[in-house]
């Protein structure tokens, strides 16, 4: 072996994590790949072996492309140390088009109905939690996972902001409307003696941090009780769709008020904690009204180009 592949892999992962990357599942995938090479007596990372590993099991091109992307980074690192120990893996060997699920966009009346039904859940502590959680997600556009991870001391009542940690450990400050501050204060009063000066902001029925799977399951039951059904082209309403609704409503507001939509997209990308602004531009295709606005802008651009 011209290079110690496992030692190089450990250094590669440690170096990337030191730069802030989370690298979920990277250890498992890389170690599994190296186990496969070792079992076959292979001491070099090749394109052929990486492709064969990435395409197992039969789970679809999108997952295969993600697996190969992990191995491409490792191979590039090892190649820089010793070109004889690893071949460079070109991009585009597995083409996988990313398709986004069409979001369920809630009306204000539907959000109110969900909050009202949630407040009647038993036990009452779970009801108060779900009622407040839905309201917070609807008014801030936070990811549900971000809300589950909030602690009491992340709320700055004096400045009316929340300190939120998003994907890849990215931190941001989310401003809160006065009514949201009041709703959170009411929730704290409902918790009463269970409330602690520190610890999780949202708690479950027994007072511990609200479990994400529990919250999503309860939300699905509330959706069913409210009679909300899947719309053509999209699946059942989800908790995460409250974030999509917030983003789309913000862009519709900009369009109706005559504001610069591109400027709103840039602001919204930062506000929502998007790493890539193209994720925010996707919302322009999420509703018929915004699609119409995009079509009008394209038609206007084409007319100007013919002059």
Image (cartoon, rainbow, N blue to C red):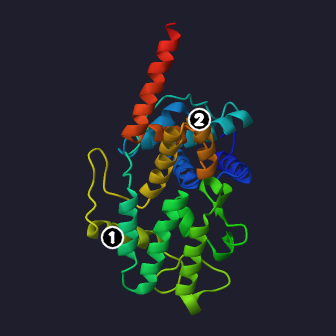
- The x, y position of residue 89, in whole percent, is 57, 31
**SS class of the residue under badge 1?**
helix
Most extreme residue toward the front, as rendered?
A: 257
Place residue 130 in its image quadrant: bottom left
* Residue 260 visible in image: yes
Q: Residues within 10 Å of mark 1 (few under 14, many from 20)?
A: many
Judge from the rendering whether residue 211 lies leftward or rightward of residue 18; answer left or right. left
- The x, y position of residue 282, in whole percent, is 48, 39
Which of marks 1 and 2 precedes in the sequence? 1
**SS class of the residue under badge 2?**
loop
- The x, y position of residue 70, in whole percent, is 56, 43
The residue located at (50%, 62%) in the rendering is: 137
Residue 164 vs residue 263, the one in the foreground: 263
Q: Which mark is residue 222?
A: 1
Above or below residue 23? Residue 218 is: below
- The residue beneath circle 2 is 260
Most extreme residue toward the bottom, as rendered?
A: 193
* Residue 55 visible in image: no
Judge from the rendering whether residue 208 lies leftward or rightward of residue 286; answer left or right. right
Q: Residues within 10 Å of mark 2 (few under 14, many from 20)?
A: few
Q: Which mark is residue 187?
A: none
């Amino acid at each position: 072996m011209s290079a110690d592949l496992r030692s190089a892999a450990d250094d590669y992962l440690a170096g990337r994590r030191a730069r802030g990357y989370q690298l979920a599942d990277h250890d498992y995938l890389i170690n599994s790949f190296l186990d496969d090479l070792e079992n076959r007596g292979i001491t070099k990372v090749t394109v052929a072996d990486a492709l064969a590993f990435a395409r197992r099991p039969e789970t679809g091109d999108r997952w295969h492309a993600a697996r190969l992307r992990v191995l491409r980074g490792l191979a590039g690192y090892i190649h820089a140390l010793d070109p004889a120990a690893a071949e460079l893996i070109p991009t585009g060997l597995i083409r996988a088009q990313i398709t986004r699920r069409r979001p369920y966009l809630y009306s204000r009346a539907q959000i109110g109905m969900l909050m009202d039904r949630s407040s009647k859940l038993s036990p009452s502590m779970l009801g108060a939690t779900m009622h407040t959680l839905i309201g917070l997600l609807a008014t801030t556009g936070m990811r549900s996972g971000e809300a589950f991870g909030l602690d009491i001391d992340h709320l700055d009542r004096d400045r009316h902001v929340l300190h939120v940690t998003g994907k890849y450990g990215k931190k941001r400050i989310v401003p809160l409307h006065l009514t949201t501050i009041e709703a959170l204060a009411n929730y704290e009063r409902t918790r009463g003696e269970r409330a602690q000066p520190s610890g999780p902001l949202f708690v479950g029925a027994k007072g511990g941090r609200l479990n994400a799977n529990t919250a999503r399951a309860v939300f699905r039951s509330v959706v069913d009780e409210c009679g909300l059904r899947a719309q053509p082209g999209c699946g059942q309403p989800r908790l995460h769709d409250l974030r999509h609704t917030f983003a789309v409503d913000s862009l519709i507001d900009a369009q109706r008020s005559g504001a610069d939509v591109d400027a709103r997209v840039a602001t919204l990308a930062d506000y929502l904690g998007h790493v890539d602004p193209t994720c925010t531009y996707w919302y322009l295709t999420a509703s018929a009204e915004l699609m119409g606005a995009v079509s009008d802008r394209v038609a206007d651009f084409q007319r100007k180009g013919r002059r």
